[in-house]
Image (spheres, rainbow, N blue to C red):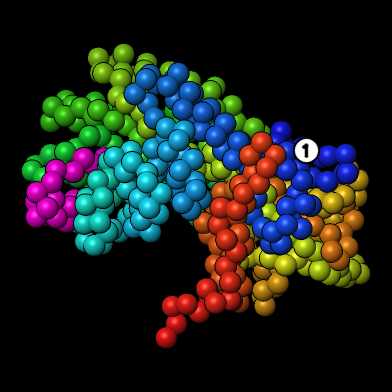
Amino acid sequence: MIHENYTVNEKGHLCVGGADCVLLAEKYGTPLYVLDEDMIRQRCRIYKAALKEAFGETALPFFASKSLSFLGIYRIIAEEGLGTDIVSPGELYTAKKAGFDMSKSCFHGNNKTDADIEFGVKSGVGYFVVDCEEELYALNDICGRLKKKQKILLRLTPGIDPHTFAAVRTGKVDSKFGSPIATGAAEKMLKKALALGNIKLCGYHCHIGSQIFECEPFCRAARIMASFSLDMKNKYGYEAEIINLGGGFGVRYTEADPEIDVFAYTKQIGDTLKEFCRENGMKVPTVFMEPGRGIVGAAGVTLYTVGSKKAIPRFRTYISIDGGMPDNPRYALYKSKYTALIANKADRACDCKYTVGGRCCESGDLIGEGMTMQNAERGDILAVLVTGAYNYSMASNYNRIPRPPIVLVSGGTDKLAVKRESYADLIKNEV
Ligand code: LLP
């Protein structure tokens, strides 16, 4: 199967991390998010070791928690010794409640309010990733009032346009994020940052996009960032201590996607950066990266129950499931492709093709079209693979559908990490 944590047991049932998906569906009901905790930990260790090998001992991955945010994940990430990337006060609040050491966090966001900034400073966020001039001044003022000095990185756009879908492309010049190097805006930001008393500039950040399979754009970004740092060193005597290269390593969703070798990719990026520094007499900076999908993507499976099957002659056959765009909006938003199978018939041939529809009152509510799998009938358990990232974190209550629970599996045993929302939860804020 597309990842080694998916196996089939003697009953012909799909297992994830050794746990039988059919039994999990019986025990917890569907729809259900299942996360393989052992795999998440293994991915953390791979990223941590790969970064240290490529960039040196000070390098650190910061888990991009926009991909998956709930108390339990911050505890796992903390135990594995990673930092975290947070992008909203809600993520910050969750990480704090989980007991996360906020000095190991990067606080993102292209429009932090004064309240967000104050919350971040008071919470002891490690690094604010400052997006714009307004934030720089607001942060400086708030720090002055709180009598604190805040470490920051400047978010820069290196002008790279990797081949990926437009909605998740963030590093090119035309972007709502950061300051472009090419237009001179980044240099302007740097001059202003150096002049402010309540902040400590530690370096630069960039994020070139998501679900990228080539290594070359990352190498190019590293070179552009280092070259900007050199330029600023020559002009203003300021050399970045930290360069944060963001996230974006692609994950295998279907057989058509390659598997990224994290060690080989980071080595190549590291070699590029070190060579540039050597040639230009610069100190190699501390490198951070922010993998999200690469850590949790393949560890997740969503389980659904099949309700109906409709063959439309000369067109297609639909199957309907008890979830859909509220728990996984990625096909509706990006036409993202997934691999699916019938978990209780996982040992049988995949000789059927279905369009998988959810149960929302909207024809765009699909999980995929032309998905190849075993013959599906009412009551079967449909498993959609590689849903660990940007599924739970993007879930909504559209059509007043409660969000599914999250179950963590480890060593073949399961535990509930997030309860299923109830109907009462849906109205709890309504007066
Ligand atoms: N760092 C920054 C600053 C980011 O903006 C992102 C993702 C990441 C790290 C993590 O990227 P990853 O390693 O997960 O690719 N909802 C979309 C993805 C949006 C990604 C936004 N930023 C999706 O479902 O594909």
Per the image, the residue denoted by label 1 is: 7
User: Horizontally, is 419 left or right of 341 in the view?
Assistant: left
Please state which of residues 289 and 411 is positioned toward the viewer in this rendering. 411
* Side of 379 relative to 340 (left or right): right
Q: Is residue 410 above or below residue 307?
A: above
| Helix, strand or loop for disc 1 | strand
The number of callouts visible is 1
Image location of residue 337, percent across then percent down: 68, 51
Residue reaching furthest to the bottom: 431
Residue 48 location, x and y as percent? 46, 27
Placement of the N terminus among the 4 image quadrants: top right
- Residue 122 magenta: no
Residue 135 appears in the rendering: no
Would residue 136 be counted in the magenta stretch?
A: yes
Q: Quadrant of residue 362?
A: bottom right
The image position of residue 12, as x and y in percent, is 87, 44
Q: Position of residue 287 (x, y in %)?
A: 35, 28
Q: Is residue 412 shown above or below 276?
A: below
The one nearer the camera, 43 or 351, is: 43
Q: Residue at x 27, y 59 (%)?
A: 116
Q: In the rendered image of this protein, does residue 369 appear above or below residue 401? A: above
The answer to whether one can see residue 120 in this image is yes
**Residue visible at 87% across and 50% down?**
345
Judge: label 1 CB < 8 Å from ligand 1: no
Question: In front here: 371 or 313?
Answer: 371
Q: Residue at x 82, y 40 (%)?
A: 8
Span shown in magenta: 135-155
Graded by Cα atoms within 10 Å as few (under 14), some (14 to 19) or many (20 or more), the crowding at tag 1 reads some
At label 1, the amino acid type is Thr
